[in-house]
Amino acid sequence: MSLSLCIFNTETKKRKLRGKKMVGSKDSRWSLHGMTALVTGGTKGIGHAIVEELAGLGASVHTCSRTESELDDCLLEWKAKGLRVTGSVCDVSDGAQRESLLNTVSSEFNGKLNILINNVGTNILKMVSDYTAEDVAFLTSTNFESAYNISVLAYPLLKASAAGSIVFISSIASTMPAYLAPIYGANKGALDQLARYLAYDWAGDNIRVNTVAPAVIKTPLAQRSFEGRKEKIETTICRTPIGRLGEPEEVSAMVAFLCLPAASYVTGQLINVDGGMTTNGIYFPQNKRSNTAVSGETARA
Ligand SMILES: NC(=O)c1ccc[n+]([C@@H]2O[C@H](COP(=O)([O-])OP(=O)(O)OC[C@H]3O[C@@H](n4cnc5c(N)ncnc54)[C@H](OP(=O)(O)O)[C@@H]3O)[C@@H](O)[C@H]2O)c1
């Protein structure tokens, strides 16, 4: 047998083994029991919903945020609900704090991590030429560098689990320009592409890497962006086939699916959770069915 054929056969055997290992009973494919997860930014909005979704499916979850009092309140709330969640204060844009976070996760989960959700992200609403160098550095370290560095720090733990999954929380602003979000959108575009590279690089270690890109979801971050801009909400709803804004649980459900053994053949994908907005349709009057009134002016636009 030629050397190349031999390598091909060995690779094929390895891949067959991997595939077999992931296809279990129906119950095991739709459960996260026995798995460990790190979710960044879990005290509010989408991150909070992801913590509850993963823990509700049986995972032991560690989360972090910068505000200790809010983190403590959330941990109490989760304990009362019977969910297995721990947490640490960490600013993910700070290198030393990231290392300390991953050390905590490693000792808590005995050196093995199944799931990493890079959820933290933020925006500063400005036109492209109005950003300062500090704004750009802050946004890029929070939205992109933190997720990249945490993924690299988590890599040995994900590999050790023999069934790892990373989900990046991006945004539809990574593929469609969004008003007052040029640096945020560019940071998210970089995340999308990083996820594809990691999917290639780490597939051999049984680590899958995917991206979820929400449209406007009702969270404190979105509330800040829409403050005093009623017309922006109306226009957004008008351009959304489903005719309303999204709920955090509608994002966390997709994130959880990607982490389940049921998604064992899904990697390197970007999935929009956007009520259909990225289909980019032109005029569909039935989209006005939401509870939020659409003004006559916007409807005619
Ligand atoms: N909401 C939307 O419409 C929407 C749309 C598309 C994409 N997304 C993306 O979804 C993700 C979550 O957004 P969200 O709307 O849920 O945001 P959010 O309501 O502002 O919540 C952000 C969470 O992350 C924590 N956090 C923020 N900066 C942090 C940092 N440097 N280090 C550690 N924790 C930090 C916050 O707690 P502390 O402030 O206490 O640290 C909070 O728990 C982001 O990546 C965002 O870009 C959101």
Image: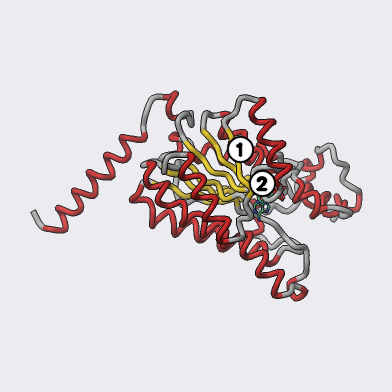
Q: Is residue 165 left or right of residue 298?
A: left
| Disc 2 secondary structure class | loop
Q: Position of residue 159 (x, y in %)?
A: 38, 47
Write down the quadrant of residue 82 in the picture: top right
**Most distant residue in the right direction:** 296
Question: In this figure, which residue is indicated by the disc labeled 2?
Answer: 274
* Residue 185 to residue 64: above or below: below
Q: Residue at x 52, y 34 (%)?
A: 60
Q: Is residue 237 left or right of residue 199?
A: right
| Disc 1 secondary structure class | helix
Q: Position of residue 53 (x, y in %)?
A: 60, 33
- Look at the image and tell me in which quarter the C terminus lies: bottom right
Amino acid carrying mark 2 in the image: Asp
The crowd level at tag 2 (other Cα within 10 Å; few <14, some 14-19, many 20+) is many
Question: In this figure, which residue is indicated by the disc labeled 1?
Answer: 51
Q: Is residue 230 left or right of residue 169?
A: right
